[in-house]
Image: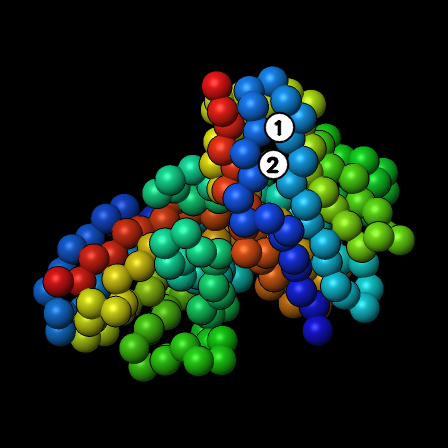
Amino acid sequence: AQSVTQLGSHVSVSEGALVLLRCNYSSSVPPYLFWYVQYPNQGLQLLLKYTTGATLVKGINGFEAEFKKSETSFHLTKPSAHMSDAAEYFCAARRPSGTYKYIFGTGTRLKVLA
Amino acid sequence: GAVVSQHPSRVICKSGTSVKIECRSLDFQATTMFWYRQFPKQSLMLMATSNEGSKATYEQGVEKDKFLINHASLTLSTLTVTSAHPEDSSFYICSAFLAGGLNEQFFGPGTRLTVL
């Protein structure tokens, strides 16, 4: 069965430091992968996605992620954290064909320290 | 483009009443919409898949008679929480699937339901 695991429910970084949020998937075929950000009492905003092609994907707000099939990972990074990055981040996966349903990870709350 | 709205954004109701939440795709047609429930500090839990013109498909453990879903048009899906109770209080989020080149879900801003 397909699943998404986010290691670390809470991550704290200092402002200006590297942000690394981890996401691993379990799937019989490489899925489409997504990272979303959620601010309090708001919906989800897409940061970036991987479907096919280049495995290093750049998104909004300086975030990027690399799809590594051998490691079944899709970790999210940002070189320099900003206070406004503090939010909840969700990794999601869906099959390339058939159902359009997403499988969400449990989320990682990012805290940025001044 | 690809904007999804939800109405209302917040609703407070008394126990035993029914509440309807609307999800609209504003600038595209969505044959498929999804309804999620999110408890505080938790992930999104898929409740059901809504397909225009047909019955919704509910996830295991979701009471279809309690959470009525109607996808009456290509731009509107509604979730009605019937005979609401305090345990139904939650954040409800819908999404609309944009097929074609993007092949992704676009999420609404969510509706905070509080049942007293």
Residue bearing the label numbered 1: A60
Of residues A95 and B44, the one drawn nearer to the viewer in this rendering: B44
For disc 1, the chain is A
Location of residue A36 by image quarter: top right
Amino acid carrying mark 1 in the image: Ile
Q: Residue at x 85, y 38 (%)?
A: A54
Residue A85 place in picture, x, y as percent? 52, 28
Q: Residue furthest right?
A: A70
CA separation in Å, label 1 and label 2: 5 Å
Horizontally, residue A49 falls left or right of residue B7, namely right
Residue B24 place in picture, x, y as percent? 39, 50
Q: Is residue B84 above or below residue B106?
A: below
Location of residue A66 by image quarter: top right
Confirm whether residue A88 shows in the render.
yes
Q: Is residue A78 above or below residue A100?
A: above
| SS for callout 1 | helix
Q: Residue at x 54, y 49 (%)?
A: A9
Circles 1 and 2: CB atoms closer than 8 Å: yes
For disc 2, the chain is A
Q: Residue at x 58, y 57 (%)?
A: A104
Residue B81 place in picture, x, y as percent? 26, 69
Residue A40 place in picture, x, y as percent? 37, 40
Location of residue A64 by image quarter: top right
Amino acid carrying mark 2 in the image: Leu
- Residue A47 disc label: 2
